[in-house]
Amino acid sequence: MKKLLTLATIALAVVFAASIISPSTVAEEAAEMAAGELDGKALFTDTHKCNMCHAVPVAEIAAKTKNEKMKGADLGGKVEGELAEIAAYVRKEADIDGKTHKKPFKGTDEELQAIIDWLGSLEAQE
Ligand code: HEC
């Protein structure tokens, strides 16, 4: 009987410990998975409409605007060595050649990272 009680106590302790540890771990894992599962291409074209002004020739994406003044540089092949700067740049926290981005990025860090990861992955395919 005493042994059973000990086992029950241990079992309870394990369940209790798991309930303390797992919620945050599960939440963190869910956030990481969400970031990894975000579709950078869809965010670029549909959610944030970067393709309004930017073409991505390697992904066969054309810029939608007909206004040449609005157009930004073609992306994909041109971001070499700049991937790390893009986040701060499109948030208007940093400039490239003395100019900041036309349109401030309004999405989440995870979304921005997914877009940058996607642009970076295109480079690898070339
Ligand atoms: C309203 C038009 C417009 C939209 C929308 C837009 N951009 Fe831009 N973007 C520009 C212009 C203009 C430049 C600066 C001129 C250039 O680089 O040709 C630029 C520059 C950039 C550059 C630097 C390119 C380089 O090689 O110097 C990156 C990276 C960039 N944009 C990413 C994005 C991303 C990601 C989005 C979507 C979240 C986006 N842009 C949405 C107009 C736009």
Image (cartoon, grey):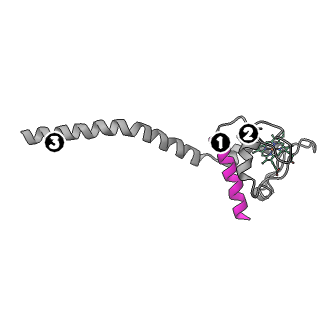
Compute the Cα span from label 3 to label 2: 55 Å
Residue 2: within the magenta? no
Q: Nearer the viewer, residue 47 or 13?
A: 13
Q: Nearer the viewer, residue 26 or 21?
A: 21
Are circles 2 and 1 on residues that touch, CB within 8 Å?
A: yes
Q: Quadrant of residue 46?
A: top right
Say whether disc 2 or disc 1 marks the residue closer to the N-terminus. 2
Tell me the kind of residue under disc 2.
Answer: His
Name the secondary structure under disc 1: helix
Q: Main secondary structure of the magenta part?
A: helix
**Residue 7: numbered disc:** 3
Q: Quadrant of the C terminus?
A: bottom right
Quadrant holding ligand 1? Answer: top right
User: To which residue does mark 2 refer?
Assistant: 48
- Point out the residue furthest to the bottom here: 126
Mark 2 packing: few (<14 Cα in 10 Å), some, or many (20+)? some
Residue 121: within the magenta? yes
Tell me the kind of residue under disc 1.
Answer: Glu
User: To which residue does mark 1 refer?
Assistant: 111
**Residue 97: numbered disc:** none
Task: Give the image location of residue 32, x and y in percent.
Answer: 53, 45
What residue do we see at 33% from left, 40% from top?
Answer: 18
Compute the Cα span from label 3 to label 1: 47 Å
What residue do we see at 9% from left, 42% from top?
Answer: 3
Mark 1 packing: few (<14 Cα in 10 Å), some, or many (20+)? many
